[in-house]
Amino acid sequence: MRRVFFLIGIMLLMQSCLVSRLSRPKLTGYIYAKDSKQPIEKCKVGESYTDAWGYYELSEKRYREITFIGNEAPPVFVQELIFKKGYVTDTIKAFNRYGGAARKNTHWKIDTIFLKSK
């Protein structure tokens, strides 16, 4: 009886695998002032800051998961806070239903975001 359970366990392990899942792709884009149409420097976007041209870049984040053959990839929902003193706070929101199965070095280019002055 122990052998049967052992063989079933081995068969289940053989059908499983360790995969790399995407929790956030590399995000890039620009932040501009809505009224002046000028780039906003040193604006906090997630854990990053914009440069003199309003450009930001957030690195890709991944995690490992043990999965079984036939399991569906999880969705990816990205939500990153945008903050700059003197401007209305905004959020980057992006979604992909099966994004968790994306390959390494996945890159999403976000449209230019225009922040309103307070």
Image: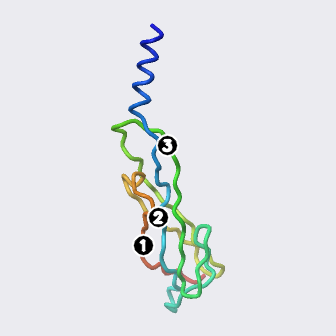
Q: Which residue is mark 3?
A: 65
Q: CA distance from mark 1 to mark 2?
A: 12 Å
Drawn side of residue 115 relative to residue 108, left or right: right
Whether residues under marks 3 and 2 lie with C-beta atoms below 8 angstroms apart, the answer is no
Res 109 label? 1
3 or 1: tag closer to the N-terminus = 3
In the displayed structure, would residue 2 be above or below residue 57? Answer: above
Name the residue located 54 percent from the left edge and 83 percent from the top edge: 54
Residue 93 got which mark?
2
Looking at the image, which is closer to me, 115 or 27?
A: 27
Under circle 3, the secondary element is: strand
Quarter residue 80 falls in:
bottom right
Q: Residues within 10 Å of mark 2 (few under 14, many from 20)?
A: few
- Taking the spot 60% from the left edge, 80% from the top edge, the residue there is 87
Q: Nearer the viewer, mark 1 or mark 2?
A: 1
Which of pointers 3 and 2 indicates the residue nearer the eye?
A: 3
Crowd rating for badge 3 (residues with CA inside 10 Å; few <14, some 14–19, many 20+): few
Name the spot of residue 36 as percent of width and height, x first.
52, 92
Asked which quadrant contains residue 46, the reply is: bottom right
Q: Amino acid at mark 3?
A: Glu
Secondary structure under the numbered disc 1 in the rendered image: strand
Q: Earlier in the sequence, mark 1 or mark 2?
A: 2
SS assignment at label 2? strand
Q: Mark 3 or mark 2: which comes first in sequence?
A: 3
